[in-house]
Image: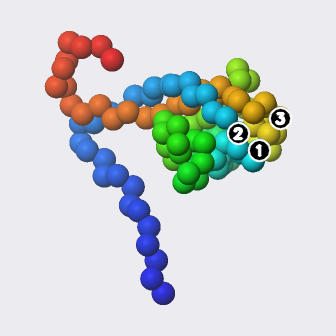
Amino acid sequence: LEVEYELPPVSVQGSSVIFRTVEVTLHKEGNTFGFVIRGGAHDDRNKSRPVVITCVRPGGPADREGTIKPGDRLLSVDGIRLLGTTHAEAMSILKQCGQEAALLIEYDVSVMGESCPNQRL
């Protein structure tokens, strides 16, 4: 039995992570935007997780648009915030929106050291 998997990136000492958001407009194909989500609110707060994109289907609308990557967080769909929604509610919002939707995506940016200490990001 041979198992392949990608290791998470190695944390670099002195690096930090900041969050950025971007709005992406996608068009559905066959009732899908071409990505898979996981997470959502749970009755047990310790089990609640943000709605995260876990897979971008090759050749699908999200893949062709090019902005959305696995690990990105889906914050809203057509202005409907997903914070506090269950996975089922988030899926329902995605299914019920029109053929075109504006998605607010949050992603991580690694900041390495202090190469530009006087510059604001």
Residue at 57 percent of width and 37 percent of height: 73
Q: Nearer the viewer, mark 3 or mark 1?
A: 1
Residue 28 circle label: 2
Residue at 25 percent of width and 44 percent of height: 12
Residue type, numbered disc 2: Lys
Residue 5 x/y as whole percent:
44, 67
Task: Decide which of 36, 57 is in the foreground and name it.
Answer: 57
- Residue 49 image-quadrant placement: top right
Q: Nearer the viewer, mark 3 or mark 2?
A: 2
Q: CA distance from mark 1 to mark 2?
A: 6 Å
On the question of residue 89 being in view, the answer is: no
Residue on which disc 3 sits? 96
Q: Outermost residue toward the left?
A: 115
Residue at 19 percent of width and 25 percent of height: 114
The quadrant the C terminus occupies is top left
Residue on which disc 1 sits? 31
- Label 1 with label 2: CB-CB less than 8 Å: yes
Residue 55 x/y as whole percent:
57, 52
Q: CA distance from mark 3 to mark 2?
A: 11 Å
- Residue 53 image-quadrant placement: top right
Residue at 31 percent of width and 47 percent of height: 11
* Residue 99, above or below 64: above
Q: How dense is the environment of label 2, judged by Cα within 10 Å: few (below 14), some, or many (20 and up)?
A: some
Residue type, numbered disc 1: Asn
- Label 3 with label 2: CB-CB less than 8 Å: no
